[in-house]
Image: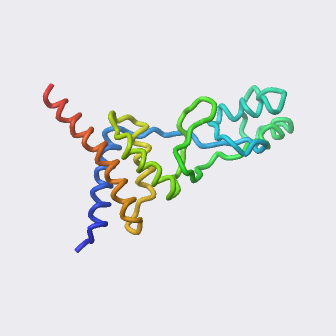
């Protein structure tokens, strides 16, 4: 017989799968940084613009693949780092345009998101919410502390109830 944590996780995974099927999550871009500032994260478009300001020649006219770049374009791109998923203590967004960036939550980040959903329950189910819930559940497993499992389940259940209410409203119409 499965233990209680396994059953709770199974229910959470089933509900999250249904949520993501009904409201497909966004597919955010990867995070980039400037080597010079070790600070904010950017989307690809904004990091090229920021590097262009820093480079003082402006961005290249074309974002050419690495194998077609000139020496000047290579020098330009040498100041840009990232382009991969990274762990984060919170959700990630481009510093300039605010678009959501791909992220993987640390355990601390999971706890912060759980607290967020406890204080500000989901009121409308959007593709951004599906992505955030998916990122939250990504770090929850059978060995996770009980409060993290239950907190993630509460967040998923908030979205599940909204999905159920949407279905009831559609049937009533």
Q: Please say which color scheme the image uses.
A: rainbow
Quadrant of the snapshot with the C terminus: top left
Residue 30, image x and y in percent?
59, 43
In the image: residue 6, left or right of residue 80: left
Q: What residue is rendered at 56% in x and 38% in y? A: 93
Q: What residue is rendered at 40% in x and 39% in y? A: 129
The vertical placement of 2 against 91, above or below, is: below
Which residue is most to the bottom?
Answer: 1
Q: What residue is rendered at 34% in x and 39% in y? A: 122
User: Looking at the rendering, which quadrant does residue 51 occupy?
Assistant: top right
In the image: residue 94, left or right of residue 19: right
Marker count (numbered): 0
**Residue toward you, 21 or 147:** 147
In the image: residue 57, left or right of residue 102: right
Residue 49, image x and y in percent?
72, 29
**Residue toward you, 69 or 28:** 28
Which residue is most to the front?
Answer: 119
**Residue toward you, 106 or 138:** 106
User: Looking at the rendering, which quadrant does residue 146 occupy?
Assistant: bottom left
Residue 20, image x and y in percent?
35, 43
User: Looking at the rendering, which quadrant does residue 170 occupy?
Assistant: top left
Residue 35, image x and y in percent?
76, 45
Which residue is most to the left?
Answer: 172
Quadrant of the snapshot with the N terminus: bottom left
């Amino acid at each position: 017989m499965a233990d209680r944590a396994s059953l709770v996780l199974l229910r959470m995974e089933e509900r999250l799968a249904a949520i993501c099927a009904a409201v497909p999550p966004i597919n955010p871009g990867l995070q980039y940084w400037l080597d010079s500032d070790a600070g904010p994260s950017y989307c690809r478009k904004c990091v090229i613009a920021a590097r262009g300001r820093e480079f003082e020649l402006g961005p290249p006219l074309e974002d050419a693949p690495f194998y077609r770049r000139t020496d000047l374009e290579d020098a330009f791109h040498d100041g840009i780092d990232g382009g991969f998923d990274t762990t984060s203590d919170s959700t990630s967004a481009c510093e300039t345009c605010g678009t959501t960036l791909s992220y993987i939550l640390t355990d601390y980040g999971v706890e912060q998101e759980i607290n967020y959903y406890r204080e500000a329950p989901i009121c409308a189910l959007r593709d951004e919410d599906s992505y955030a819930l998916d990122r939250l559940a990504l770090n929850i497993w059978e060995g996770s502390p009980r409060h993290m499992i239950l907190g993630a389940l509460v967040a998923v259940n908030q979205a599940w109830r909204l999905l159920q209410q949407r279905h009831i409203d559609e049937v009533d119409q």
